[in-house]
Amino acid sequence: MKKVRITVIRKACYEDLIALYENPIEEPCMMEEGQVFVAEGWRRPEGFCESAWETLSPFVLGLAHGAEGFYDGWMKNPRSVLLSCNDGFRPVSFFVEALDEDAEP
């Protein structure tokens, strides 16, 4: 099984939707563009958003086990995928790629 790098590529914020639909929250998304996490197989990296992990984890697990060519090969690097979390107010885009390094057992 391989390690998988997760890089925060873009973070959006839809103030108009927040004003219309969201109850005030104390701590919105704390991810920052350029932030990098490394997953050891199925384990969520420390400090990584739990909600985003629910969306990304099936792809991380697949990449860790050698899967490639997601969605009929739309990625230039077949051992990668670009995904977004499921937050409709503050969506975060992640570049997820398999590394050549083996994950720790």
Image (spheres, rainbow, N blue to C red):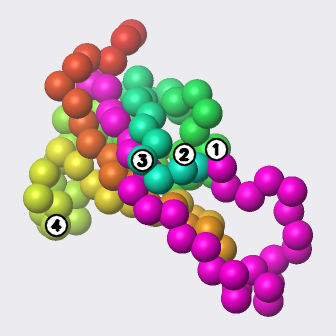
In the picture, the quarter occupied by the C terminus is: top left
Sooner in the amino-acid sequence: mark 4 or mark 1: 1
- Residue 19: quadrant of the picture: bottom right
Q: Is residue 13 left or right of residue 100?
A: right
Observer able to see residue 54: no
Q: CA distance from mark 2 to mark 3?
A: 17 Å
Identify which residue is drawn at 17% across, 61% down.
Answer: 75
Magenta residues?
1-30
Circles 1, 2 touching at the beta carbon (< 8 Å):
yes
Tell me the crowding category of disc 2: few under 14, some 14 to 19, or many 20 or more residues within 10 angstroms, Cα based. Answer: some
38 relative to 24, above or below: above
Q: For marks 4 and 1, give the CA distance.
A: 27 Å
User: Which comes before the other along the chain, label 1 or label 3?
Assistant: 3
- Say which residue label 4 marks: 74
| Residue type pointed to by label 2 | Trp
> Circle 1 is placed at which residue position?
50
* Residue 27 position in % (x across, y down): 80, 53
Quarter-of-image position of residue 61: top left
Question: Tag on residue 53?
Answer: 2
SS of the residue under disc 3: loop
Residue type, numbered disc 3: Gly
Q: Earlier in the sequence, mark 2 or mark 3?
A: 3
Q: Is residue 13 magenta?
A: yes
Q: How many residues crowd mark 4 within 10 Å: few (<14), some (14–19), many (20+)?
A: few
Q: x, y (%) of residue 1?
A: 27, 22
Cβ–Cβ under 8 Å for marks 1 and 3: no
Pointer 3: what residue? Answer: 34
